[in-house]
Image (cartoon, grey):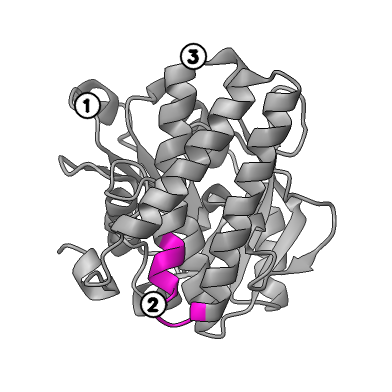
């Protein structure tokens, strides 16, 4: 019986994906494990032929979009629990054993873990800590998609990821935050476990060109601004406060970076600020969870 389905959406990252698959197939108790790969790459045949393993389900999708791919994988998954993973991360061979120990304690409905950078083992996000924490409407930014574990029935019931959010969607980010908030509004208990660690490549904006920094930061900002606008429909005071705070943080960051002549940093903060304002303004309240998921 399959207990865990690991859903991995991928696009043209076969080397890192193959390394991740090799780690996952070496997990303890891997007979309870299923790997569901949703591949959006055009030239996929050579790679798909190498995945003819019993516990791997390979799906090629011509429909672009991170959330759409993840939702397709969730729908095809057979496990009781769904793990969301990026295609460029790395895990230890005892990752599933540690996860299983947490699941068996039955302490919560949603599990999220800690992300460290591959290069120096430092927290990938400033929100990562070494303390077990219950997630709420204040500290929700601890939850990033590549460490999330859900009960599949809960995911299907709440509507999975909103297809309007995420990479290659209208609003290019915050898809996992939107989902986590919907789980919270649905009275699901979410807990952050720092012992559950994955490793992710570090993104260093200082090594990127100004155009790349602006584009990436603006796109993610649009997603965050739209996400706050979406949640104003049910949590207007909370969403308004969080949106204003996010603008203030970006503004302070821009001023600070400018004062120390960190022009890449200033570009990042200004693009994030602009993106959040734009996303908030263009979000259409005609969207809803049912229409967001194309079938």
Give the magenta-colored segment's residue range. Answer: 227-236
Name the main secondary structure of what is drawn in magenta. helix
Q: Where is 46 relative to 275, above or below?
A: above
Q: Residue 158 — which label?
A: 2
Q: Give the percent coordinates (x, y) of residue 176.
A: 48, 57
Residue 152, quarter of picture: bottom left
| CA separation in Å, label 3 and label 2 | 39 Å
Look at the image and tell me whether residue 28 can be seen.
no
Of 212 and 247, the residue lying toward us: 247
Q: Where is 32 relative to 114, above or below?
A: below
Please give the residue where the numbered disc 3 appears in the rendered image: 209
Mark 3 is surrounded, within 10 Å at the Cα level, by few (under 14), some (14 to 19) or many (20 or more) other residues, namely few
Look at the image and tell me whether residue 121 can be seen.
yes
Who's the residue at 36% across and 80% down the image? Answer: 157
- Give the total number of marks visible in the rendering: 3
Q: Give the percent coordinates (x, y) of residue 281.
A: 34, 58
Of label 3 and label 1, which has the lower sequence position? 1
Please give the residue where the numbered disc 1 appears in the rendered image: 44
Give SS at disc 2.
helix
| CA separation in Å, label 2 and label 1 | 32 Å
Give SS at disc 3.
loop
Q: Where is 174 relative to 107, above or below?
A: above
Q: Give the percent coordinates (x, y) of residue 84.
A: 48, 52
Mark 2 is surrounded, within 10 Å at the Cα level, by few (under 14), some (14 to 19) or many (20 or more) other residues, namely some
Of label 2 and label 1, which has the lower sequence position? 1
Who's the residue at 69% across and 43% down the image? Answer: 252
- The answer to whether 286 appears left or right of 227 in the picture is left
């Amino acid at each position: 019986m399959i207990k865990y389905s690991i859903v991995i959406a991928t696009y043209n990252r076969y080397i890192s994906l193959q390394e991740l698959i090799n780690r996952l197939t070496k997990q303890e108790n891997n007979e309870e494990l299923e790997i569901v790969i949703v591949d959006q790459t055009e030239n996929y045949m050579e790679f798909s032929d190498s995945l003819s393993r019993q516990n791997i389900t390979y799906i090629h999708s011509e429909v672009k979009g991170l959330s759409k791919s993840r939702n397709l994988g969730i729908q095809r998954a057979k496990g009781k629990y769904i793990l969301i993973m990026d295609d460029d991360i790395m895990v230890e061979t005892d990752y599933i054993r540690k996860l299983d120990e947490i699941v068996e304690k039955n302490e919560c409905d949603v599990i999220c873990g800690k992300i460290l950078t591959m290069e120096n083992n430092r927290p990938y996000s400033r929100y990562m800590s070494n303390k077990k924490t219950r997630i709420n409407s204040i500290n929700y930014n601890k939850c990033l998609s590549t460490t999330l574990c859900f009960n599949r029935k809960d995911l299907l019931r709440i509507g999975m990821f909103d297809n309007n959010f995420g990479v290659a969607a209208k609003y290019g980010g915050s898809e996992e935050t939107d989902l986590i908030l919907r789980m919270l509004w649905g009275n699901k208990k979410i807990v952050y476990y720092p012992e559950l660690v994955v490793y992710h490549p570090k993104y260093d904006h200082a090594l990127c060109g100004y155009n790349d920094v602006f584009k990436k930061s603006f796109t993610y900002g649009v997603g965050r601004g739209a996400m706050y606008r979406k949640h104003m429909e049910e949590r207007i005071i909370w969403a308004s406060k969080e949106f204003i705070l996010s603008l203030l943080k970006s503004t302070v960051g821009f001023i600070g970076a400018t004062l120390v002549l960190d022009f890449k940093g200033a570009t990042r903060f200004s693009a994030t600020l602009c993106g959040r304002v734009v996303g908030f303004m263009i979000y259409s309240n005609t969207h809803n969870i049912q229409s967001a998921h194309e079938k």
